[in-house]
């Protein structure tokens, strides 16, 4: 709710973006800034503790924050793109595992499953969040060659995702 | 919650609430350590700043800029630190 509110306030006051992006780590035990904290919630290693609504709110908020703001696009992009790559990789791993289990069930040969590491299903996106995730990547890469280069770093993960997740589902 | 429901009816009710120390109440409740009170307060803020397509309102801007962006600063702290109680995280 608080994240959705911040996003709503961006529409009324541009200073909201500055306050989010210039937030400093607290002097308490919460020694991280709000951008790192929120992007960290999308990391596949921590995704079990987050939920779909929060994830959607985070993706929407950052899309709003970086819109038409080159500096913010750069700093959010540099942090978000590696996490995005890691997340896509984790989803592909999970989908491969799911396919192996399905094939093993169909053929009755369960030996294949034992060789595969089980993967958490929490890494998957809801259809709505998947759309928001790629929208954020799209906004990061838009209008500037430098940012497109940033996205190219996760080209392999994007191709795998397209091959394993999108095409198999269709 | 009753105020949230009332405010959804019209912009006039929102204006009356804000004239009657509404902002001070919102700021005070943002410091609450009770998760339900806090959540209802956030719902109230969302209701106040949401405007219908046909209407134009300054409430969103007013709330954002009040007391040097106090609400926004508090929201950022809430997102990072929760209620500020050790071993307690926001669940909603």
Image (cartoon, coloured by chain):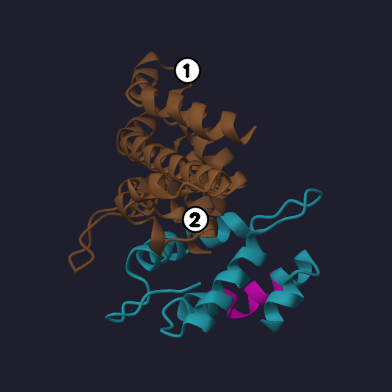
Chain colours: A brown, B cyan
Is residue A91 visible to us here? yes
Is residue A5 visible to us here? no
Q: Residue at x 34, y 63 (%)?
A: B80
Q: Main secondary structure of the magenta part?
A: helix
The residue singled out by tag 2 in the image is A6
**Mark closest to the chain's N terminus, 2 or 1:** 2
Q: Which residues are magenta?
A: B15-23
- Is B82 on the left-hand or right-hand side of B57? left
The x, y position of residue B60, in whole percent, is 60, 57
The x, y position of residue B10, in whole percent, is 80, 67
Residues behind callouts 2 and 1 on a single chain: yes
Q: Quadrant of the C terminus of chain A?
A: top right
Q: Residue at x 57, y 53 (%)?
A: A8
Q: Of the residues tagged 2 and 1, which is closer to the observer?
A: 1
- Chain containing mark 1: A
- Is A149 on the left-hand or right-hand side of B56? left
- Chain containing mark 2: A
Q: Is residue A27 above or below residue A99?
A: below
Mark on residue A143?
1
- Is B89 on the left-hand or right-hand side of B91? left
Between residue B81 and residue A27, name the one nearer to us.
Answer: B81
Q: Quadrant of residue A159?
A: top left
Query: How many other residues sit within 10 Å of disc 2, few (<14), some (14-19) or many (≥20)?
Result: many
Between residue B17 and residue A68, name the one nearer to us.
Answer: A68
């Amino acid at each position: 709710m608080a994240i959705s509110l911040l996003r709503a306030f961006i529409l009324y006051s541009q200073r909201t973006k500055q306050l989010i992006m210039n937030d400093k780590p607290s002097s308490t035990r919460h020694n991280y800034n709000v951008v790192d904290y929120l992007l960290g919630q999308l990391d596949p290693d921590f995704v079990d503790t987050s939920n779909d609504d929060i994830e959607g709110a985070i993706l929407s908020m950052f899309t709003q924050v970086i819109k038409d703001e080159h500096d913010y696009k750069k700093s959010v992009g540099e942090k978000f793109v590696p996490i995005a790559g890691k997340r896509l990789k984790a989803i592909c791993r999970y989908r491969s595992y799911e396919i192996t289990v399905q094939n093993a069930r169909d053929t009755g040969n369960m030996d294949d499953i034992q060789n595969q590491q089980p993967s958490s299903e929490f890494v998957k996106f809801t259809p709505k969040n998947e759309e928001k995730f790629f929208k954020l990547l799209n906004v990061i890469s838009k209008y500037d060659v430098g940012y497109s280069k940033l996205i190219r770093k996760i080209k392999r993960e994007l191709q795998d995702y397209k091959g394993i997740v999108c095409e198999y589902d269709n | 919650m009753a105020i949230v429901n009332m405010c959804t009816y019209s912009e006039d009710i929102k204006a009356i609430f804000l004239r009657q120390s509404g902002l001070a109440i919102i700021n005070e409740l943002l410091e609450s350590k009770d998760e339900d009170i806090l959540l209802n307060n956030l719902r109230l803020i969302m209701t106040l700043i949401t405007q219908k397509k046909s209407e134009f309102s300054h409430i969103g801007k007013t709330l954002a800029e009040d007391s040097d962006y106090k609400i926004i600063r508090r929201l950022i702290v809430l997102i990072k630190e929760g209620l500020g109680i050790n071993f307690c995280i926001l669940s909603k």
